[in-house]
Amino acid sequence: MKQVSFLLVCFLSPLIASAFSHVDRAASFEYGDPGIKSMHALAFSPDGVLFIGDSKSATIFAIQTEDVSAGKEVEDIEVNKVDELIADALGTEVENITIQDMAIHPLSKRVYLAVHHVDGTPVLLTIQKGRLDVVNLSSVNYSKAALGSPVEESATDRRGRSLRQWAISDLEYFDGRVLVSGLSNKEFSSSVTMMSYPFKENDQELASLEIWHAAHGQFETHSPIKTFTTAIINSEPQVVASYTCTPLVLFPLSMMKSGAHVKGRTVAELGNRNTPLDIISMEKGGESYLLMANTSRALMKISYQALESFDGSLTEPVTENSGTAGIDFINLPLVNVLQLAKLDDKRFVMLQRRSNGDLDLHTGSADRWL
Amino acid sequence: MEVLWKGGKAITVCFDAFETHSPLEVILLGKQTSIFGNWEQKNDQWCFTPVVSFTEALQYGIVREGVIVDTLVIEGQTREKTRVVATYPSADTVPENLLKVHLLFSAPMGEQYSEGFITVTNADGDTLSKTFLPLQPELWNVTHDHLTLWLDPGRIKRGLGPNLWLGQPLNKGQTYHLTISAEWKDRQGRPLETEYRRTFVAGDADRQKPDPSGWQFSIPVAGTKDPLHIHFNEVMDFSLISDCISVWQGQRFIPGDFRIGKGESSITFYPVNDWAPGRYQISIETRLEDLAGNNLIRLFDVDVGDIDSHSVTEDQIIEMEFEIGK
């Protein structure tokens, strides 16, 4: 064995950024089978385009749902044992399916569910008036934008080895843009990508985000964003993101540029040993609120007014076990809520594991719960 | 009745034509719901392809006009059961601040969450709680036969709340058992061949960045396909080793195969072509991590107040050069 000299260090552009900036997007819709391999996150644009985050192919698909039966007042959505209903309709057992995400069509108010079969087959289902249907994705109008596809200039790709696999944790449409949060199966890293919609060539921004994690008492650049939403706060579009161990952090959209390193403002620390599952915004009496579902804590209600008036950032560690800090929140008497989606201005739909073990899809009223 | 298989899955069932124009349905016996799928008439047969493949051992009924006219049980094909082929790090002793564990399977696993199938117990047989970070979606590779688990970073990083309250997941000198339940299903919905169990011991924490200047190389001989051995001075993360190292001659990429050495503390490069005399560079991406998640340019766990810890470093390349004589 012979030791050789240590030579030089040269800088390359960030590999993550280059992976994400190498995009393969159709500018317009194609007709056919989009070839979706998995469905980890769903979101709608206001006009009913369905965005599907596919971690396996690291691609965001935009689907024309042709689901435009708007106008009628819809009834509350109440489906008990929805997992059994799905398993029966797929000819299998409950343990062989997982519900990955839920979204409600803004016009038809139909509930869309992304479901994975144990064999990896993704299935898109809809529920309306208690009736379950399957969406045939073999012939739809779609466009797509690839994330993190192999980059030619990387030595890793030239060897034909696998690159990072991105797990898409959440996605949302906001004002002509699609935002995607993801993390890597390889090194400890996390990212948010923002792209214009309709998808265009070379039009993705990947920013690295940094937060002060008060439960951890330090800055974190690699924590995975678990769920987020977007909102206008103090006249500025912002990402409201929640992380494992539950810091709530604001990032101005205007600062999310490729290569930018954005320091988020931690406005609340909502307790450790918890993972946030879903966030939506609701209104009551002219006030807006965030609703956040959690693994180990109740459904939380947070006032946007409090978000707007809290102009600081938490920088001191929370010293008490499971302690909280920052803006106030209220624990609603709803536990084990796994998915949330806004039905209309006054109602939201929850996927909730009841105390008797049943997995129910049901409607909550803002007047009653907020 | 004929069952058509594809990729180990029962995807279609065909029956001789019923003399009927009434629509047919397939249900799970004991249920009322018509199963989603497509009907197709092929010659004298009706064929039904459900949206997801049939589940082995379940009983299905073919229904016509509300009456069950036939039943079907999917008998599993005889084939090898899926098993755990390896877990990494493979060494019996791991640093007490170990960050990642890799599970490799012989075939694609199912889409169930891993939680509930993986347990870590201590020498007393007590099950440790909250050892791994719950992530959704989980960190599978594309072929779904390699799962990466993170030990909870909040518990590993010293002085953080979870670390103070719960302690780090592993403690030096302690013996642990990793068990993977045979109940975990593969992509065909079949349980694993057998329970997987291994024992490991937590050793000293690793609080040093990997330092390639201490790595050792064997220099190949010109005109041969001699392998190039690279010995690290510590164990590296299994999933990153082969991704982060490549061999070049100037701008020319040298094609070949890498094999990770026993214990993940070395890698060997087998060139496709004979080595020519000249200077070569071993390119190492700085995102390469050791078992504690320290990469070549940053420690995973740094003191609060250290300014460097707040800066974000870009991915970089470190090159090391060697020369093959004539």
Image (cartoon, coloured by chain):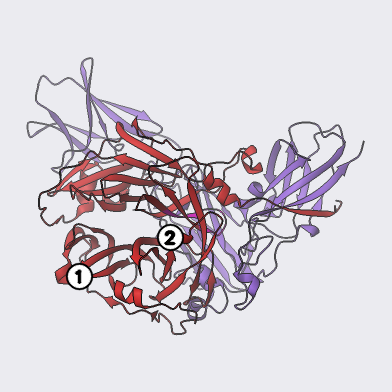
Chain colours: A red, B purple
Q: 10 Å neighbourhood of mark 1: few (<14), some, or many (≥20)? A: few
Is residue B282 located in the magenta-colored stretch of the structure?
no
Mark toward the start of the polypeptide (2 vs 1): 2
> What is the secondary structure assignment of the residue under circle 2?
helix
Give x and y (percent) for residue B263. 68, 55
Tag 2: amino acid: Leu
Give x and y (percent) for residue A249. 42, 69
- Residue ID at (7%, 31%): B65
Give x and y (percent) for residue B81. 45, 42
* Chain letter of the residue beneath label 1 in the structure image: A
Name which quarter of the figure residue A119 lies in.
top left
Magenta stretch: give its range.
Answer: A180-190
> Toward the viewer: B140 or B259?
B140
> What is the secondary structure assignment of the residue under circle 1?
loop
Give x and y (percent) for residue B140. 48, 50
- Residue ID at (24%, 63%): A353
Q: Residue beneath label 2, please? A: A253
